[in-house]
Amino acid sequence: MTSGLIAAYRRTTYEAAGACARIGRRSAAVDALLARLGAGEGAFVTAWNPFSRRMPRGWNDRMLARLRYAARRLPRAEGVGGAGGWEERHLLIGGDPRRIVVLGRRFRQVAVVAVRRGRPARLVLLQPQR
C-alpha cells in the first residue's frame, strides 16, 4: 500500500448512523453506536472499489448489497466515508474485527478501520491470502 493511500485513509471521516470516526482518534458517538449494536468492538468495511481501484457506481452498489447479505446475521449500521470530495458507502459491523477482516478480504479490500469502545480507531491493513 502506498503512503498516499495510507494518508487518504487517515484523512477520511468514517460515518455510520450519524456517528463519526477518524483513524487515531476516540469517538464517544461510535462508542455509543457500538453499545446500541450490542458490541464492544467492530470495524468499518466496504465492498466498493476493490483493491482501491475506482469502479462504476452501479457495480459498487451491487457489491455493497452482497456485503450486506454476507453480514446479515451481524449487528451493523449503514454509513459513508469520505474526504476532499471523495466518498464511499460502507458498513460499521459490530463484532470481532478479525471476523470482519475476513469479509474485507472476500470483497477485495486493502484495509478496514477497527473500532473498540474507549479506544482510538485504527487502520488494519489486509495482507493478501496466499
Image (tube, helix red, strand yellow):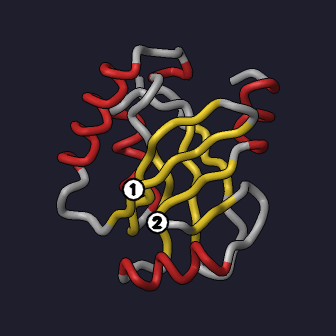
Res. 48 mark: none
In this rendering, is residue 4 above or below 53?
Answer: below
- The kind of residue tagged 2 is Ala
Task: Tell me, yes or no, whether the two marked residues, 1 and 2, touch with CB atoms within 8 Å.
Answer: yes
Q: Is residue 19 left or right of residue 9?
A: left
Measuring 45% from the left and 84% from the top, which residue is drawn there? 35
**Quadrant the N terminus occupies:** top right
Q: Could you say where residue 130 lies in the image, as x and y percent from the top left?
A: 41, 23
Local secondary structure at mark 2: loop
Q: Could you say where residue 106 lies in the image, as x and y percent from the top left?
A: 33, 33
- The kind of residue tagged 1 is Glu
Local secondary structure at mark 1: strand
Q: Dot 1, how many residues are within 10 Å of its Cα: few (below 14), some (14-19), or many (20+)?
A: some
Measuring 47% from the left and 77% from the top, which residue is drawn there? 34
Q: Could you say where residue 21 lies in the image, as x and y percent from the top left?
A: 66, 61
Q: Which residue is mark 2?
A: 17
Q: Using the image as rendered, state which of residue 51 and residue 82 is in the foreground.
A: 82
Q: Which residue is mark 1?
A: 78
User: Looking at this rendering, what residue extends furthest in the front direction?
Assistant: 85
Q: CA distance from mark 1 to mark 2?
A: 6 Å
Q: Dot 2, how many residues are within 10 Å of its Cα: few (below 14), some (14-19), or many (20+)?
A: some
Q: Is residue 56 left or right of residue 52?
A: left
Q: Could you say where residue 20 lies in the image, as x and y percent from the top left?
A: 63, 63
In this rendering, is residue 89 above or below 127?
Answer: below
Res. 23 image quadrant = bottom right
For marks 1 and 2, the one nearer the N-term is: 2
In this rendering, is residue 76 above or below 105?
Answer: below
